[in-house]
Every structure is written in structure tokens, then in C-alpha cells.
Image (spheres, helix red, strand yellow):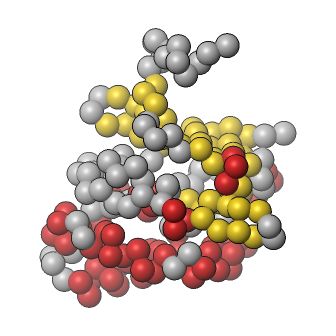
């Protein structure tokens, strides 16, 4: 039986293809100038395994949810809040969580296969990232190396991965008839 979760992401103005430099108010993005989920829609996060095309992506953990019991049965509705609104930015269906310790080898394999080590340049291009790391590339790269294993911490078959061209505004009081047609 599928499990459904709504998962907030850090807001991104580059379509989640690379970090956009949006100012954060808390957490990892505030400390580092980018969030790991900012590559969720990058074409570089595609891969094929045993004839099936997948998308790798990142969200923060789902707390105590028993993700290991639902491999390939999780649907994540990824949302972002900004400027007083909340938007649906992506959906990953039939997803498998790679966060549990027993999946660390698979996560590491994906990191290498997708060449995630090289994505540091996307983040370093942003003034906010350079500033937060005191314009010291060595300091930044040390931080990057420590955390890159978490960028691909989910996978979803590509035909169950949906990233709209424009985020869909979620209004709990007034549903958009174009989105919710019968």
C-alpha cells in the first residue's frame, strides 16, 4: 500500500537545476548559502539501473516514518514556501529512501555515478556561498566533501517523477480549477 508524504524543500528560483542564491532564514541553507535539494530537477540526476530510468534527489529525513518498510511505495509531494505562499514544486512516486545506514553504499555509488563531487562549482558561483565561506575555496570544499553523500538520498523511477515547469501555488481555501479538474 503506497505511503504519501508532503515534504518541504528550500525555495529555488532556478527550477531546481542548480542553487539559486535565495537567502535562507535557518538551517543548512542559512549556514552554507545553498540546500542539497537545489539539484532535484537537474538533468545530471538521471540514471538507468537494470533498464529502468530513475531520478535521484534530496529531501531531509521523514522523521520516524518507517521508510525502509515501503521501498518503491512512497510518494513525496515536495513543496516550498516563499513570499507568503506555498507551492508544489515536484512529486516523486514509487520512491525509495536511501537515507538508512544499510543504504549508504548505494548512496555512495550514486554520488560517484552522477559525478556529484563536481556540482560544487554550481554552489561556489553564488556570492552568498562565497561570502558565507569567507571567500575561501578550501574551507568551502572541505564543507562540501563532508556533506555531498547526502545529495542523492532518494530515487524514483523517472516516469513517476514530476517536476512542473512552473510551481503550482497551493491555496487551501481556493483550489485552482485548472489543477483539480474532474
Which residue is located at x 67 percent, y 54 percent? Answer: 158
Quadrant where the C terminus lies?
A: top right
Quarter residue 101 falls in: bottom right
Q: Say how many tags the image has.
A: 0
Left or right: 41, with 66 as reference point: left
Quadrant where the N terminus lies?
A: top right
Left or right: 85, with 96 as reference point: left
Residue reaching furthest to the bottom: 138
Residue reaching furthest to the right: 1
Q: Is residue 132 visible?
A: no
| Residue 52 in the image: above or below residue 85 | below
Which residue is located at x 57 percent, y 82 percent? Answer: 112
Quarter residue 35 falls in: bottom left
Which residue is located at x 62 percent, y 59 percent? Answer: 55
Image location (x, y in percent) of residue 79:
48, 39
Image location (x, y in percent) of residue 72:
77, 53
Q: Is residue 81 visible?
A: yes
| Residue 89 in the image: above or below residue 115 | above
Image location (x, y in percent) of residue 121:
32, 76
Image location (x, y in percent) of residue 156:
68, 55
Closer to the camera, 31 or 73?
Answer: 73
| Residue 106 in the image: above or below residue 24 | below
Closer to the camera, 158 or 58?
Answer: 158
Which residue is located at x 62 percent, y 15 percent? Answer: 181
Amino acid at each position: 500500500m503506497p505511503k504519501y508524504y508532503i515534504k518541504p524543500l528550500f525555495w529555488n528560483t532556478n527550477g531546481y537545476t542548480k542553487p539559486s542564491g535565495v537567502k535562507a532564514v535557518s538551517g543548512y541553507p542559512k549556514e552554507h548559502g545553498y540546500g542539497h535539494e537545489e539539484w532535484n530537477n537537474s538533468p545530471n540526476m538521471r540514471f538507468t539501473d537494470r533498464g529502468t530510468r530513475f531520478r535521484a534527489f534530496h529531501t531531509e529525513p521523514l522523521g520516524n516514518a518507517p521508510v525502509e518498510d515501503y521501498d518503491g511505495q512512497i510518494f513525496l509531494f515536495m513543496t516550498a514556501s516563499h513570499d507568503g505562499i506555498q507551492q508544489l514544486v515536484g512529486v516523486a512516486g514509487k520512491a525509495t529512501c536511501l537515507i538508512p545506514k544499510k543504504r549508504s553504499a548505494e548512496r555512495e555509488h550514486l554520488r560517484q555515478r552522477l559525478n556529484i563531487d563536481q556540482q560544487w562549482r554550481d554552489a561556489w558561483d553564488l556570492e552568498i556561498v562565497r561570502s558565507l565561506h569567507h571567500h575561501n575555496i578550501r574551507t568551502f570544499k572541505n564543507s562540501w566533501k563532508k556533506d555531498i553523500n547526502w545529495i542523492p538520498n532518494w530515487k524514483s523511477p523517472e516516469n513517476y517523477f514530476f517536476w512542473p515547469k512552473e510551481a503550482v501555488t497551493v491555496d487551501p481555501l481556493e483550489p485552482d480549477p485548472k489543477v483539480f479538474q474532474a
